[in-house]
Amino acid sequence: MKKWILAFFIFSIMLSSYSYTWEKLYSIEGECEISFPNKPHHMKQVVPVQDLNAFMNYDVYMSFVDDENSICMMIVVDFPTEIDITKEKQSLEGFINGVINYKEDKKLLYANFSEFNQLNALDFLLESDNRFFKGKAIIADSRLYLIAMEYNSNLDLDKTFNKYIDSFNLKNHSN
């Protein structure tokens, strides 16, 4: 009997190390909420925009999904001025081109314009060094939201990705 209890205890510990509990995060700066697989780390960066004599604020939230270095991330970029609605798709296209050209070894597997709560969005999947970078970029007023996952290409994390994306909610826009 003691062997069974010990085996159950060890199995429980092993199982708990591979599972995660979703934690809801509310970003005051981004006026949004999202659920991460674990408590996210938050980093903030302020970048000067020389042409406008202003600043862009970046809020980055990252959370590990598993022991395979899979990461959920949300980046909120707050621009100093509102993005012209007629140029939102062009801005999203510029964003994905910037990501692709940041390192030349990235391969674009797909990129499609979509809508998120009546806002312009871009769904994409990139591959680099046997890792996927899958995400959705959304523009709302003067903000760009990037909700993405990075993970090894041999893993099937579509359900986790969909749960992550579906948990995203903008507070200043109606669903």
Image (cartoon, grey):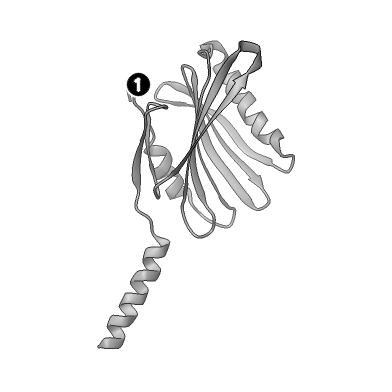
The type of residue carrying mark 1 is Asn
**Dot 1 alpha-carbon crowd within 10 angstroms: few under 14, some 14 to 19, many 20 or more:** few
Q: Quadrant of the C terminus?
A: top left
The location of residue 108, given as percent across then percent down, is 66, 38
Q: Quadrant of the N terminus?
A: bottom left
Quarter of the image for residue 170 reads top left
Looking at the image, which residue is at 49% across and 41% down?
Answer: 73
Q: Is residue 133 left or right of residue 2?
A: right
Looking at the image, which residue is at 70% across and 35% down?
Answer: 102
Q: Is residue 24 left or right of residue 142?
A: left
Total marks placed:
1
Of 171 and 46, the residue lying toward us: 46
Looking at the image, which residue is at 53% across and 11% down?
Answer: 84
The location of residue 169, given as percent across then percent down, is 36, 31
Instruction: Say if 62 sits above or below 53 in the image.
Output: below
The location of residue 135, given as percent across then percent down, is 53, 38
Instruction: Say if 95 sits above or below 37 in the image.
Output: above
Instruction: Say if 131 sits above or below 4 in the image.
Output: above
The residue identified by callout 1 is 172
Quarter of the image for residue 110 reads top right
Looking at the image, which residue is at 50% across and 60% down?
Answer: 67
The location of residue 32, given as percent across then percent down, is 38, 29
Query: Which residue extends farthest left?
Result: 1
Of 16 and 166, the residue lying toward us: 16
Q: Is residue 152 left or right of residue 163?
A: right
Instruction: Say if 103 sits above or below 71 in the image.
Output: above
Circle 1 SS class: loop
